[in-house]
Amino acid sequence: MSSADWIAISPLIAVAAAAVVVMMLAAFWRRHAIVAAASMIGLAVALFCVLPARSAAPRMVTGLLAIDEFGLFYVGLLLKGSLAVAAVSYGYLRARGRDAEEYYALLLTATLGCVTLAVSAHFVSFFLGLEILSVSLYALIAYTRERARSIEAGIKYLVLAAGSAAFLLFGMALLYAEYGAMGFAPLAKALKASGGANVYMLAGMALILVGAGFKLAAAPFHLWTPDVYEGAPAPATAFVAGVSKVAMAALLLRFLTQLGATDSRPILIALSALAVASMFAGNLLALLQRNVKRILAYSSIAHIGYLLVAFIAAGPMGAEAATFYLAAYMITTLIAFGVVAALSPRDRDADAMEDYQGLFWRRPWMGGAFVAALLSLAGIPLTAGFIGKYFVVASGIGSALWALVLILALNSAIGLFYYLRSVVAVYARPGEEAKAADRAPGFSLAGGVALAVLGFSLILLGVYPAPLLRLIQTAIASL
Amino acid sequence: MQTVWPLFVYLAAAAAVPAGMIMVSFVLGARHSDRATGEPYESGIVSTGSARLRFPIHFYLVAMFFVIFDLEAVFLFAWAVAVRELGWAGFAEALVFIGVLVAALAYLWRLGALDWGPKPFARLSHSRHKDS
Amino acid sequence: MILTLLILILLIGGAAAWAAERKSPLWSRGIALGAVTLDLLLVVGQWAALRHAPEFLKPGAWLVETRAEWIPQFGVSFHLGMDGLSLLLLALTFFLGALSVACSWSEIQKRVGFFHFNLLWVLAGIAGVFTALDLFLFYFFWEMMLIPMYLLIVIWGHERRVYSAIKFFLFTQASGLLMLIAILTLQFLHFKQTGARSFDYSDLLNVAMTPRAAMLLMLVPEASLRFAPVAMALGVVGILYGAILAFAQTDLKRLVAYTSVSHLGFVVLGIYSWNAWAMQGAVMQMICHGLSTGALFVLVGLLYERIHTRDLRRMGGLWSAAPRIGAMAMFFAMASLGLPGLGNFIAEFLVLLGAYHVSVWMTALAGIGLVGATIYSLSLMQRAFHGPAEEAWSFADLSAREWAVLGAMAAALVWLGLYPQPVLHAAAPIVESLEKIGSALPGFFMR
């Protein structure tokens, strides 16, 4: 490996080193504030390393990792998301008041898995990244181990993630057996040489889609989502929903684009079925919920459905739409769960609708951020979600996917109903119990700053998205 | 299809053997229903208590540590085979690998996971008081 | 530049009004009133300054135009423009906006700052909708105004406010999404034909379309024209249906709401009759309806504030308790039924005159609507203000502030009724250009 290679993968190395350093701090200097600060500094250093890495790009490192504009864009995005999660976690864990230090080491390894996924261009690194991510997430989800729900969620995620990994491996094995290649680029070449789809290719792709569908929580592989979102501690939920899904989607985007898989009709039909099922399942089931974390879980399922429309639209426009949508979605989700985390008391998460009763009058800024996140999820102007949804619809129309676009519009209308119900609660007159519990135990300065930055970006992207769009265009052009 | 038919024959035979054994014992076997027939050990001492014992967590810990640190050897063997071809770069990478494992070991040691005395995890519970 | 300023004044004024609540609610009311009045003065000033400009009478020209790059990747620009029609509508908006700040002066007592923030942002959204020349921008403003409107209903509404707010929002949003799809399709067709991405109205106007696609989209005049007979029939149905339902209501506010449906039927009928008289009438009707119906809603609010009911069955004999409110209600009920001398008469007369040239039948049916308007207006007066008093009402009559609000609206209606020339003058160029398009496509025009 040349020195340029090292520079190219320096963000990954920085995250890995930060994980080890944080683990050592947890052993030898067990102070919550110090460990949290170290992990945030580590993530910031990794983020800074993206700059030199960009100058070394594009470059294949060892045939496993493709360091290009696309990968580095997502690496930057994921690191920022992870940084926000770490900041939000600090107040939450301080309120919980015990054993906070290991959390950050797990968060860093999970981030390492995410950034590996974003730059991997080979089945081996794909699987490696996925497993680093999953194994860290099992522990993160079950981290509040004094709560039965949390442990249940961890075990559910363990069983289903392991199952989906098996599907994924089987799919990879089938493709390898047929084409004798595991890198995405050689695979694409072999695919082209063999002249179109055959049974092995379709079966392999279907199994890989099943595995990825589990991770993305696309219906009908979404069954774990509400339980895990509800049981996991709120900052971990933020990571699962906001960061890990973005990483998986980035990998899928690269994989499908490089293989030209969207030219194949059966794959398009499979993706369309996933999209339609996700949109309807997510929105209709969310209507029945009263628990805020479960509402957000079902809404995230629906959002994966919208995202898949951009995947199906394909082409540069579809990929750009998907990337913008993911960025907007990540910011929005992190704000929503960040507010949940900040409001959570020591012994439970603030996930009942009553916790949000009159929030806007008690805490205008936090209430405002929560409403902005809900409106962004609903795709209302002035928020990033609007531009994202607009872009997805535009890419769908650009590829003449009329049925999908109409279903998307219908589902947006359904979705509005439960978002608005939550908005009503935030603006309602505060109830008596809510007044009594008028505090945000999980709030910290770091978390507040993170929420403020996220909220600002949410509005900025909604009003002036042009710079980010330019960045995304260069990223997609490198794909 | 031409070449795989022996496989199906073999499968059928494999299924037939246990099926036949169960059938034969079902037909020929004696039947009785006494007081102890339903017990796990019909001829032995009647069991008492629950089978769900609570093992000390150390049992699992030791097993896991063994697996983790034993696997290290597998990677090192693979490296040892190619040590000359990999040169100093390979040596450095193996060193990083071992270094991470040593860090993990140090972490476990400081946490008290290696203390098998009556009060394990002293440090972890100690820190609980300090932070809250 | 002036257009951007109009919107910015409202946005900043809203935020300032919210922030000023800390100091005193009076401050936020004052700031809100000041911001809207400033906008009104600016628009009226523009009107006075541009009245004699040559562009004022030239069809298809913009009096004022602003354009800046916004999202070049999508071909979206921040493009605002104002012609005579949008000038009129802006003036109406700010006039009513200032009056609604004034008439909520004592009615809104809680969360005063946030109320005015929402009110001003709604006005900013409406001003944007009236001036946007980029369809993306149009949609952006359209959606942006819904949220504060929704909050106004949810927080300061009366009974069943959550239900009605969510219903309102779902209906407008769902139809808005369909509009977005239509806009995007138009944009996409334009992209396919020219290779350039643009949302600009003037660009998209020239997109060549198959008749079927055009029917589906209807954003452009030619396509609208094909739809004219259906739309005229819908307008007539709206007039009659609104009048009948208005007559059947027992809730005063619902009654006024249905009269509004009836009046807007005239606007639809006028536009799709597609000739100068009818379209001038439609413009007049938009303005006069805004004033007369707005005033009736203000009166409903005044009464509710005093007697805490809107149920007509419990009212009756209110005139003796509050003769000034009664007189004002009489005046606006007369305006609503189209009494000559008031603006509504001019509007409805022009619409019927224009529609007569297109279809005698529809005009006759719409004329029945005028009879309906007489019936519901007089029955409203009869049931609420005359007749035996159900309960012994005693409450304060109009205050000076309320006098000023209603008096301003009444004066505007009288002015429009006696001297409508300025409005007709300002709307003339846009009407002329639309008529030209209509005569270019005689084949679709129903005689």
Image (spheres, rainbow, N blue to C red):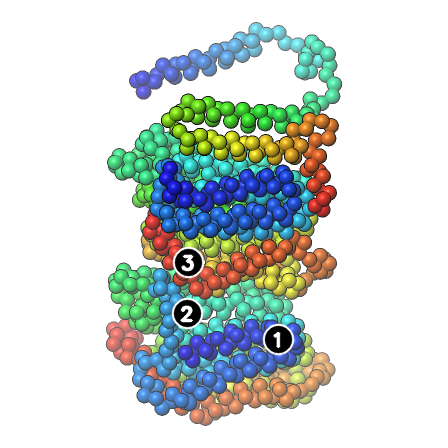
Q: What amino acid type should be assigned to the residue bearing mark 2? A: Phe
Query: Which mark, residue B55?
Result: none
Question: Is B47 above or below relative to A320?
Answer: above
Q: A214 or A199: which is nearer to us?
A: A214
The type of residue carrying mark 3 is Leu
Question: Which of pointers 1 and 2 indicates the residue nearer the eye?
Answer: 1
**Residue found 55% across the figure and 82% down from its top:** C34
Which one is earlier in the sequence, the residue at label 1 or at label 2? Answer: 1
Residue A266: horizontal and vertical position, in percent? 34, 41
Residue C25 in percent (x, y) is at 65, 77
Disc 1 chain ID: C
Is residue A82 in view? no
In this view, the residue in front, A361 or A4, is: A4
Residue A227 percent across, percent down from the top left:
58, 43
Mark number, residue C20: 1
- Give whichever of C234, B128 is nearer the camera: B128
Q: Secondary structure at mark 2?
A: helix
Q: Which residue is mark 3?
A: A468
Q: What is the chain letter for disc 2?
A: C
Along the horizontal axis of the image, is C344 left or right of B55? left
In three-dimensional space, the C-alpha distance between marks 1 and 2, rounded to whole angstroms, equals 30 Å
- Residue C186: percent from left, percent from top: 33, 64
Label for residue C138? 2
Up-down: is C264 above or below B87?
Answer: below
Give the structural element (helix, strand or loop) at label 1: helix
Residue at x 60%, y 83% (from the top left corner): C382
Spot the residue most to the front: B88
